[in-house]
Image (spheres, rainbow, N blue to C red):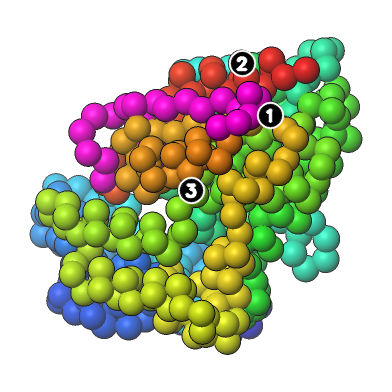
Amino acid sequence: MTQGVSIAESHRIARAVVQMAQVGHFGGIVELFGPPLAAVVSVKALKDAWAAETAKIGGISFVGEPASDPTTAGLVRVSVPLTGERGTLTVVVSVDDKGVVQGLRLDPAARGSWTTPPYAAPTRFEEHDVALGTGALVVQGTLSMPRGPATVPGVVLLSGGGPFDRDETAGSNKPLKDLAWGLASRDIAVARFDKVSHTHADYVARTPEFTMTDDYVPHAVAAVRLLQAAPRVDPDRVFVLGHSMGGKVAPRVAQAEPSVAGLVIMAGDTQPMHHAAVRVARYLAALDPPFIDAAGVEMITRQAARVESPDLSSSTAANELPFGFSGAYWLDVRGYDPVATAASLDKPMLIVQGGRDYQVTVDGDLAGWRAGLAHRRDVTLRVYSADDHLFFPGSGPSAPADYEAPQHVDPDVIEDIAAWIKSRV
Protein backbone atom coordinates (compact mmCIF):
# COMPACT_ATOMS: atom_id res chain seq x y z
CA MET A 1 0.00 0.00 0.00
CA THR A 2 1.28 3.41 -0.92
CA GLN A 3 -1.36 5.33 1.04
CA GLY A 4 -4.28 4.76 3.40
CA VAL A 5 -4.11 2.20 6.17
CA SER A 6 -0.77 0.73 7.17
CA ILE A 7 0.34 -2.87 7.10
CA ALA A 8 0.00 -2.92 10.87
CA GLU A 9 -3.60 -1.71 10.59
CA SER A 10 -4.32 -4.41 8.02
CA HIS A 11 -2.97 -6.97 10.48
CA ARG A 12 -5.22 -5.51 13.20
CA ILE A 13 -8.26 -5.82 10.95
CA ALA A 14 -7.41 -9.45 10.11
CA ARG A 15 -6.96 -10.26 13.81
CA ALA A 16 -10.31 -8.63 14.53
CA VAL A 17 -11.99 -10.80 11.88
CA VAL A 18 -10.59 -13.94 13.52
CA GLN A 19 -11.54 -12.78 17.01
CA MET A 20 -15.11 -11.98 15.97
CA ALA A 21 -15.42 -15.35 14.24
CA GLN A 22 -14.22 -17.13 17.40
CA VAL A 23 -16.96 -15.52 19.48
CA GLY A 24 -19.63 -15.89 16.80
CA HIS A 25 -19.97 -12.19 15.96
CA PHE A 26 -20.33 -12.76 12.21
CA GLY A 27 -22.51 -9.70 11.74
CA GLY A 28 -19.58 -7.57 12.85
CA ILE A 29 -17.36 -9.19 10.24
CA VAL A 30 -19.86 -8.56 7.45
CA GLU A 31 -19.99 -4.89 8.47
CA LEU A 32 -16.30 -4.66 7.48
CA PHE A 33 -16.99 -5.97 3.95
CA GLY A 34 -16.92 -3.86 0.81
CA PRO A 35 -20.12 -3.89 -1.30
CA PRO A 36 -19.02 -6.65 -3.75
CA LEU A 37 -18.20 -9.05 -0.92
CA ALA A 38 -21.24 -8.13 1.18
CA ALA A 39 -23.46 -8.77 -1.84
CA VAL A 40 -22.47 -12.42 -2.06
CA VAL A 41 -21.54 -13.45 1.51
CA SER A 42 -24.30 -13.28 4.10
CA VAL A 43 -23.94 -13.56 7.87
CA LYS A 44 -25.42 -17.07 7.74
CA ALA A 45 -23.16 -18.21 4.90
CA LEU A 46 -20.12 -16.94 6.80
CA LYS A 47 -21.28 -18.59 10.02
CA ASP A 48 -21.90 -21.91 8.26
CA ALA A 49 -18.53 -21.82 6.47
CA TRP A 50 -16.71 -21.09 9.71
CA ALA A 51 -18.52 -23.91 11.52
CA ALA A 52 -17.80 -26.38 8.71
CA GLU A 53 -14.08 -25.61 8.49
CA THR A 54 -13.37 -25.38 12.22
CA ALA A 55 -15.24 -28.65 12.80
CA LYS A 56 -12.61 -30.35 10.68
CA ILE A 57 -9.70 -29.17 12.85
CA GLY A 58 -11.38 -29.31 16.26
CA GLY A 59 -11.16 -26.64 18.94
CA ILE A 60 -8.75 -23.81 18.10
CA SER A 61 -5.81 -23.93 20.48
CA PHE A 62 -3.52 -21.32 18.93
CA VAL A 63 -3.82 -18.23 16.72
CA GLY A 64 -0.57 -17.42 14.91
CA GLU A 65 0.88 -14.08 13.88
CA PRO A 66 -0.51 -12.45 10.73
CA ALA A 67 1.67 -12.49 7.60
CA SER A 68 1.27 -9.99 4.76
CA ASP A 69 1.32 -10.49 1.02
CA PRO A 70 0.92 -7.03 -0.58
CA THR A 71 1.13 -8.35 -4.11
CA THR A 72 -2.03 -6.80 -5.55
CA ALA A 73 -2.08 -3.05 -6.03
CA GLY A 74 -4.36 -1.42 -3.48
CA LEU A 75 -4.78 -4.58 -1.39
CA VAL A 76 -2.87 -6.29 1.37
CA ARG A 77 -3.60 -9.99 1.70
CA VAL A 78 -3.18 -10.99 5.36
CA SER A 79 -2.94 -14.66 6.36
CA VAL A 80 -3.70 -15.66 9.97
CA PRO A 81 -2.83 -19.30 10.79
CA LEU A 82 -5.02 -21.21 13.24
CA THR A 83 -4.06 -24.47 14.95
CA GLY A 84 -6.74 -26.89 16.14
CA GLU A 85 -6.80 -30.26 17.83
CA ARG A 86 -6.80 -32.16 14.53
CA GLY A 87 -5.25 -29.80 11.99
CA THR A 88 -4.69 -26.26 10.82
CA LEU A 89 -6.65 -23.55 9.01
CA THR A 90 -5.57 -20.24 7.52
CA VAL A 91 -7.87 -17.23 7.48
CA VAL A 92 -6.97 -15.01 4.50
CA VAL A 93 -8.27 -11.44 4.67
CA SER A 94 -7.78 -8.96 1.80
CA VAL A 95 -7.85 -5.34 3.00
CA ASP A 96 -7.88 -2.31 0.72
CA ASP A 97 -6.18 1.03 1.36
CA LYS A 98 -9.26 2.36 3.14
CA GLY A 99 -9.35 -0.52 5.61
CA VAL A 100 -12.30 -2.21 3.89
CA VAL A 101 -12.32 -6.02 3.66
CA GLN A 102 -12.58 -6.93 -0.02
CA GLY A 103 -11.90 -10.66 0.33
CA LEU A 104 -12.18 -13.38 2.97
CA ARG A 105 -11.18 -16.99 2.52
CA LEU A 106 -10.82 -19.99 4.83
CA ASP A 107 -7.97 -22.16 3.56
CA PRO A 108 -7.71 -25.65 5.05
CA ALA A 109 -4.20 -27.07 5.11
CA ALA A 110 -5.36 -30.07 3.09
CA ARG A 111 -6.25 -27.83 0.18
CA GLY A 112 -2.79 -28.35 -1.27
CA SER A 113 -1.15 -26.54 -4.14
CA TRP A 114 -1.64 -26.67 -7.89
CA THR A 115 0.04 -29.62 -9.59
CA THR A 116 0.87 -30.27 -13.23
CA PRO A 117 -2.11 -31.84 -15.03
CA PRO A 118 -1.44 -35.32 -16.44
CA TYR A 119 -2.08 -34.00 -19.97
CA ALA A 120 0.58 -31.27 -19.74
CA ALA A 121 4.20 -31.80 -20.81
CA PRO A 122 6.26 -28.84 -19.50
CA THR A 123 9.29 -29.88 -21.55
CA ARG A 124 7.33 -29.18 -24.74
CA PHE A 125 7.02 -25.44 -24.14
CA GLU A 126 8.63 -22.50 -22.36
CA GLU A 127 7.08 -19.58 -20.52
CA HIS A 128 8.03 -15.98 -19.88
CA ASP A 129 6.29 -13.00 -18.33
CA VAL A 130 4.91 -10.17 -20.43
CA ALA A 131 3.36 -6.78 -19.70
CA LEU A 132 0.14 -5.67 -21.38
CA GLY A 133 -1.50 -2.27 -21.54
CA THR A 134 -0.17 1.23 -21.13
CA GLY A 135 0.17 3.87 -18.46
CA ALA A 136 -1.24 3.26 -15.01
CA LEU A 137 -3.25 0.19 -16.03
CA VAL A 138 -0.43 -2.11 -17.15
CA VAL A 139 -1.05 -5.72 -16.13
CA GLN A 140 1.25 -8.72 -16.07
CA GLY A 141 0.77 -11.87 -18.08
CA THR A 142 2.42 -15.07 -19.24
CA LEU A 143 3.25 -16.29 -22.74
CA SER A 144 3.48 -20.07 -23.14
CA MET A 145 5.40 -20.88 -26.34
CA PRO A 146 5.77 -24.40 -27.76
CA ARG A 147 9.34 -25.47 -28.47
CA GLY A 148 10.48 -26.32 -31.97
CA PRO A 149 10.86 -24.66 -35.36
CA ALA A 150 7.29 -25.00 -36.67
CA THR A 151 4.84 -22.14 -37.01
CA VAL A 152 1.98 -22.53 -34.52
CA PRO A 153 -1.48 -21.04 -33.91
CA GLY A 154 -2.09 -18.94 -30.81
CA VAL A 155 -4.89 -18.30 -28.34
CA VAL A 156 -5.58 -15.60 -25.75
CA LEU A 157 -7.31 -16.79 -22.56
CA LEU A 158 -9.93 -14.69 -20.71
CA SER A 159 -10.96 -15.58 -17.17
CA GLY A 160 -14.42 -15.36 -15.65
CA GLY A 161 -16.14 -12.53 -13.79
CA GLY A 162 -14.38 -11.20 -10.73
CA PRO A 163 -10.85 -10.00 -9.94
CA PHE A 164 -9.04 -13.08 -11.27
CA ASP A 165 -5.35 -13.46 -11.92
CA ARG A 166 -3.98 -14.90 -15.16
CA ASP A 167 -4.51 -18.49 -13.94
CA GLU A 168 -8.10 -17.93 -12.74
CA THR A 169 -6.86 -19.12 -9.34
CA ALA A 170 -9.54 -20.51 -7.01
CA GLY A 171 -7.97 -22.10 -3.93
CA SER A 172 -5.49 -24.69 -5.16
CA ASN A 173 -7.10 -24.85 -8.59
CA LYS A 174 -6.00 -22.89 -11.65
CA PRO A 175 -8.31 -23.64 -14.58
CA LEU A 176 -6.67 -21.22 -17.03
CA LYS A 177 -3.22 -22.54 -16.18
CA ASP A 178 -4.55 -26.05 -16.88
CA LEU A 179 -5.75 -24.81 -20.25
CA ALA A 180 -2.54 -22.92 -21.03
CA TRP A 181 -0.25 -25.84 -20.20
CA GLY A 182 -2.52 -28.36 -21.92
CA LEU A 183 -2.74 -26.34 -25.13
CA ALA A 184 0.94 -25.34 -25.14
CA SER A 185 1.81 -29.03 -24.80
CA ARG A 186 -0.16 -29.53 -28.04
CA ASP A 187 1.75 -26.93 -30.06
CA ILE A 188 -0.50 -23.91 -29.48
CA ALA A 189 0.98 -20.65 -28.20
CA VAL A 190 -1.01 -19.22 -25.28
CA ALA A 191 -1.22 -15.76 -23.71
CA ARG A 192 -3.02 -15.15 -20.41
CA PHE A 193 -3.03 -12.08 -18.16
CA ASP A 194 -4.11 -10.69 -14.80
CA LYS A 195 -7.31 -8.66 -15.05
CA VAL A 196 -7.36 -4.95 -14.29
CA SER A 197 -9.73 -5.66 -11.39
CA HIS A 198 -7.09 -7.99 -9.93
CA THR A 199 -4.01 -5.84 -10.39
CA HIS A 200 -5.58 -2.41 -9.91
CA ALA A 201 -8.33 -3.06 -7.38
CA ASP A 202 -7.84 0.39 -5.85
CA TYR A 203 -8.38 2.06 -9.24
CA VAL A 204 -11.53 0.04 -9.89
CA ALA A 205 -12.89 0.84 -6.43
CA ARG A 206 -12.53 4.59 -6.93
CA THR A 207 -13.68 4.62 -10.59
CA PRO A 208 -17.48 4.20 -10.70
CA GLU A 209 -17.49 4.44 -14.50
CA PHE A 210 -15.33 1.26 -14.80
CA THR A 211 -17.14 -1.39 -16.84
CA MET A 212 -16.99 -5.02 -17.92
CA THR A 213 -15.57 -3.85 -21.25
CA ASP A 214 -12.79 -1.95 -19.47
CA ASP A 215 -11.88 -5.06 -17.47
CA TYR A 216 -11.37 -7.19 -20.59
CA VAL A 217 -11.23 -5.64 -24.01
CA PRO A 218 -8.16 -3.32 -24.07
CA HIS A 219 -5.81 -5.92 -22.58
CA ALA A 220 -7.31 -8.80 -24.57
CA VAL A 221 -6.71 -6.86 -27.79
CA ALA A 222 -3.15 -6.13 -26.64
CA ALA A 223 -2.63 -9.84 -25.96
CA VAL A 224 -3.90 -10.77 -29.44
CA ARG A 225 -1.44 -8.35 -31.02
CA LEU A 226 1.40 -9.56 -28.80
CA LEU A 227 0.80 -13.13 -29.97
CA GLN A 228 0.55 -12.05 -33.60
CA ALA A 229 3.95 -10.39 -33.30
CA ALA A 230 5.60 -13.34 -31.53
CA PRO A 231 8.16 -15.33 -33.54
CA ARG A 232 6.74 -18.59 -34.94
CA VAL A 233 3.10 -17.68 -34.25
CA ASP A 234 0.94 -17.55 -37.36
CA PRO A 235 -0.62 -14.05 -37.11
CA ASP A 236 -3.65 -15.20 -39.11
CA ARG A 237 -4.44 -17.99 -36.62
CA VAL A 238 -4.72 -16.22 -33.25
CA PHE A 239 -7.94 -17.09 -31.40
CA VAL A 240 -9.67 -15.86 -28.25
CA LEU A 241 -10.87 -18.32 -25.60
CA GLY A 242 -13.08 -17.00 -22.83
CA HIS A 243 -14.48 -18.74 -19.76
CA SER A 244 -17.75 -17.67 -18.10
CA MET A 245 -17.93 -13.85 -18.31
CA GLY A 246 -14.77 -14.08 -20.43
CA GLY A 247 -16.79 -16.21 -22.85
CA LYS A 248 -19.63 -13.71 -22.83
CA VAL A 249 -17.24 -10.86 -23.66
CA ALA A 250 -15.15 -12.78 -26.23
CA PRO A 251 -17.36 -11.68 -29.18
CA ARG A 252 -16.85 -8.06 -28.12
CA VAL A 253 -13.07 -8.60 -28.18
CA ALA A 254 -13.31 -9.99 -31.72
CA GLN A 255 -15.52 -7.06 -32.68
CA ALA A 256 -12.83 -4.68 -31.39
CA GLU A 257 -9.98 -6.63 -33.04
CA PRO A 258 -11.20 -7.99 -36.42
CA SER A 259 -7.96 -9.95 -36.97
CA VAL A 260 -9.05 -12.53 -34.36
CA ALA A 261 -9.27 -15.87 -36.22
CA GLY A 262 -12.11 -17.39 -34.17
CA LEU A 263 -13.61 -17.85 -30.73
CA VAL A 264 -13.75 -20.61 -28.12
CA ILE A 265 -16.52 -19.90 -25.60
CA MET A 266 -16.49 -21.98 -22.41
CA ALA A 267 -19.62 -21.70 -20.26
CA GLY A 268 -20.36 -18.26 -21.66
CA ASP A 269 -23.60 -16.88 -20.26
CA THR A 270 -26.34 -15.53 -22.52
CA GLN A 271 -29.14 -14.94 -20.02
CA PRO A 272 -29.29 -11.43 -18.53
CA MET A 273 -26.73 -11.54 -15.74
CA HIS A 274 -29.03 -10.02 -13.12
CA HIS A 275 -31.66 -12.68 -13.89
CA ALA A 276 -29.01 -15.39 -13.54
CA ALA A 277 -27.91 -13.92 -10.19
CA VAL A 278 -31.39 -14.51 -8.78
CA ARG A 279 -31.61 -18.02 -10.24
CA VAL A 280 -28.22 -18.97 -8.79
CA ALA A 281 -29.10 -17.48 -5.40
CA ARG A 282 -32.25 -19.60 -5.26
CA TYR A 283 -30.27 -22.69 -6.26
CA LEU A 284 -27.70 -22.06 -3.52
CA ALA A 285 -30.43 -21.48 -0.95
CA ALA A 286 -31.95 -24.88 -1.80
CA LEU A 287 -28.73 -26.79 -1.15
CA ASP A 288 -28.41 -28.94 1.97
CA PRO A 289 -26.98 -27.16 3.88
CA PRO A 290 -27.93 -23.90 2.15
CA PHE A 291 -25.07 -21.75 0.91
CA ILE A 292 -27.12 -18.55 1.19
CA ASP A 293 -30.09 -17.71 3.40
CA ALA A 294 -33.53 -16.35 2.51
CA ALA A 295 -32.47 -12.82 3.38
CA GLY A 296 -29.58 -13.09 0.93
CA VAL A 297 -31.92 -14.29 -1.83
CA GLU A 298 -34.31 -11.43 -1.11
CA MET A 299 -31.46 -8.91 -1.23
CA ILE A 300 -30.16 -10.18 -4.58
CA THR A 301 -33.72 -10.23 -5.99
CA ARG A 302 -34.20 -6.62 -4.92
CA GLN A 303 -30.83 -5.61 -6.38
CA ALA A 304 -31.61 -7.37 -9.67
CA ALA A 305 -34.86 -5.42 -9.91
CA ARG A 306 -32.80 -2.20 -9.72
CA VAL A 307 -30.77 -3.40 -12.72
CA GLU A 308 -34.00 -4.13 -14.60
CA SER A 309 -35.42 -0.72 -13.82
CA PRO A 310 -35.46 1.95 -16.56
CA ASP A 311 -34.22 4.29 -13.82
CA LEU A 312 -30.84 2.55 -13.65
CA SER A 313 -28.11 5.12 -14.23
CA SER A 314 -24.38 5.55 -13.74
CA SER A 315 -25.17 7.34 -10.48
CA THR A 316 -27.15 4.42 -8.98
CA ALA A 317 -25.40 3.41 -5.75
CA ALA A 318 -23.33 0.23 -6.06
CA ASN A 319 -24.70 -1.17 -2.80
CA GLU A 320 -28.17 -1.19 -4.40
CA LEU A 321 -26.96 -3.45 -7.25
CA PRO A 322 -25.84 -7.11 -7.46
CA PHE A 323 -22.25 -7.93 -6.50
CA GLY A 324 -21.56 -4.30 -5.61
CA PHE A 325 -20.89 -3.42 -9.26
CA SER A 326 -21.50 0.19 -10.21
CA GLY A 327 -24.41 1.54 -12.20
CA ALA A 328 -22.10 2.12 -15.17
CA TYR A 329 -20.92 -1.49 -14.99
CA TRP A 330 -24.49 -2.79 -15.05
CA LEU A 331 -25.50 -0.45 -17.87
CA ASP A 332 -22.66 -1.90 -19.95
CA VAL A 333 -23.65 -5.50 -19.11
CA ARG A 334 -27.37 -4.84 -19.63
CA GLY A 335 -26.80 -3.22 -23.00
CA TYR A 336 -24.61 -6.00 -24.40
CA ASP A 337 -26.05 -8.95 -26.33
CA PRO A 338 -23.29 -11.57 -26.68
CA VAL A 339 -25.28 -13.79 -29.06
CA ALA A 340 -26.17 -10.97 -31.45
CA THR A 341 -22.59 -9.76 -31.37
CA ALA A 342 -21.31 -13.26 -32.11
CA ALA A 343 -23.83 -13.67 -34.94
CA SER A 344 -22.52 -10.49 -36.57
CA LEU A 345 -18.97 -11.89 -36.74
CA ASP A 346 -17.75 -13.86 -39.72
CA LYS A 347 -15.62 -16.14 -37.56
CA PRO A 348 -15.71 -19.82 -36.61
CA MET A 349 -16.70 -20.61 -33.03
CA LEU A 350 -16.48 -23.54 -30.64
CA ILE A 351 -18.94 -23.26 -27.76
CA VAL A 352 -18.56 -25.76 -24.92
CA GLN A 353 -20.67 -26.25 -21.81
CA GLY A 354 -20.60 -28.37 -18.67
CA GLY A 355 -23.72 -30.42 -18.14
CA ARG A 356 -23.55 -30.06 -14.32
CA ASP A 357 -22.98 -26.29 -14.37
CA TYR A 358 -25.49 -24.43 -12.16
CA GLN A 359 -23.99 -20.97 -12.83
CA VAL A 360 -24.27 -21.10 -16.63
CA THR A 361 -26.71 -23.74 -17.78
CA VAL A 362 -27.40 -25.93 -20.79
CA ASP A 363 -31.12 -25.10 -20.84
CA GLY A 364 -30.76 -21.39 -20.16
CA ASP A 365 -27.48 -20.16 -21.61
CA LEU A 366 -26.29 -22.73 -24.16
CA ALA A 367 -29.80 -22.64 -25.59
CA GLY A 368 -29.24 -18.95 -26.30
CA TRP A 369 -26.11 -19.62 -28.33
CA ARG A 370 -27.84 -22.50 -30.14
CA ALA A 371 -30.89 -20.43 -31.08
CA GLY A 372 -28.95 -17.36 -32.16
CA LEU A 373 -26.31 -19.21 -34.17
CA ALA A 374 -28.38 -22.08 -35.57
CA HIS A 375 -27.89 -20.80 -39.11
CA ARG A 376 -24.09 -20.87 -38.84
CA ARG A 377 -22.33 -23.97 -40.19
CA ASP A 378 -19.01 -22.76 -38.76
CA VAL A 379 -20.26 -22.91 -35.16
CA THR A 380 -19.75 -26.09 -33.12
CA LEU A 381 -21.51 -26.70 -29.77
CA ARG A 382 -20.50 -29.44 -27.34
CA VAL A 383 -21.75 -30.48 -23.89
CA TYR A 384 -19.59 -32.37 -21.39
CA SER A 385 -22.26 -33.97 -19.24
CA ALA A 386 -20.06 -34.72 -16.20
CA ASP A 387 -18.43 -31.27 -15.98
CA ASP A 388 -19.26 -28.34 -13.70
CA HIS A 389 -18.74 -24.62 -14.30
CA LEU A 390 -14.93 -24.95 -14.11
CA PHE A 391 -15.07 -28.02 -16.37
CA PHE A 392 -14.07 -30.27 -13.51
CA PRO A 393 -15.63 -33.74 -13.98
CA GLY A 394 -17.85 -35.09 -11.21
CA SER A 395 -21.25 -36.54 -10.42
CA GLY A 396 -24.47 -35.41 -8.80
CA PRO A 397 -25.69 -31.84 -8.34
CA SER A 398 -22.86 -29.30 -8.40
CA ALA A 399 -22.17 -27.06 -5.37
CA PRO A 400 -19.60 -24.39 -4.48
CA ALA A 401 -17.75 -26.86 -2.25
CA ASP A 402 -16.98 -28.96 -5.33
CA TYR A 403 -14.51 -26.30 -6.47
CA GLU A 404 -12.35 -26.66 -3.35
CA ALA A 405 -10.71 -30.06 -3.87
CA PRO A 406 -7.54 -29.97 -6.02
CA GLN A 407 -8.46 -31.06 -9.54
CA HIS A 408 -7.96 -30.24 -13.20
CA VAL A 409 -9.93 -29.26 -16.27
CA ASP A 410 -11.42 -32.26 -18.07
CA PRO A 411 -8.77 -33.76 -20.42
CA ASP A 412 -11.43 -34.31 -23.10
CA VAL A 413 -12.07 -30.55 -23.12
CA ILE A 414 -8.36 -29.86 -23.59
CA GLU A 415 -8.09 -32.36 -26.44
CA ASP A 416 -11.19 -31.08 -28.22
CA ILE A 417 -10.21 -27.41 -27.99
CA ALA A 418 -6.69 -28.15 -29.24
CA ALA A 419 -8.00 -30.21 -32.15
CA TRP A 420 -10.54 -27.53 -33.10
CA ILE A 421 -7.97 -24.71 -33.07
CA LYS A 422 -5.42 -26.69 -35.05
CA SER A 423 -8.04 -27.65 -37.64
CA ARG A 424 -8.80 -24.00 -38.47
CA VAL A 425 -6.78 -22.97 -41.53
Query: Which badge, 2 or 1, is on the more N-terminal residue?
Result: 1
Q: Is residue 136 visible?
A: yes
Q: Is 379 included in the stretch rendered in magenta?
A: yes
Q: Spatial distance from mark 3 to mark 2, Cα to Cα?
A: 24 Å
Report helix, strand or loop for mark 1: loop
Q: Residues within 10 Å of mark 1 (few under 14, many from 20)?
A: some
Q: Quadrant of the C terminus?
A: top right
Question: Residue drawn 38% across and 57% down?
Answer: 276
Which residue is nearer to you in this view: 296 or 230? 296
Question: Residue drawn 83% across and 66% down?
Answer: 135
Q: Which residue is mark 1?
A: 348
Q: Which residue is mark 2?
A: 419
Task: Indicate the quadrant where residue 206 lies.
Answer: bottom right
Circle 1: residue type: Pro
Q: Which residue is mark 3?
A: 269
Q: Main secondary structure of the magenta part?
A: loop
- In this picture, which residue range is highlighted in magenta? 374-399
Q: Position of residue 69 (x, y in %)?
A: 52, 61
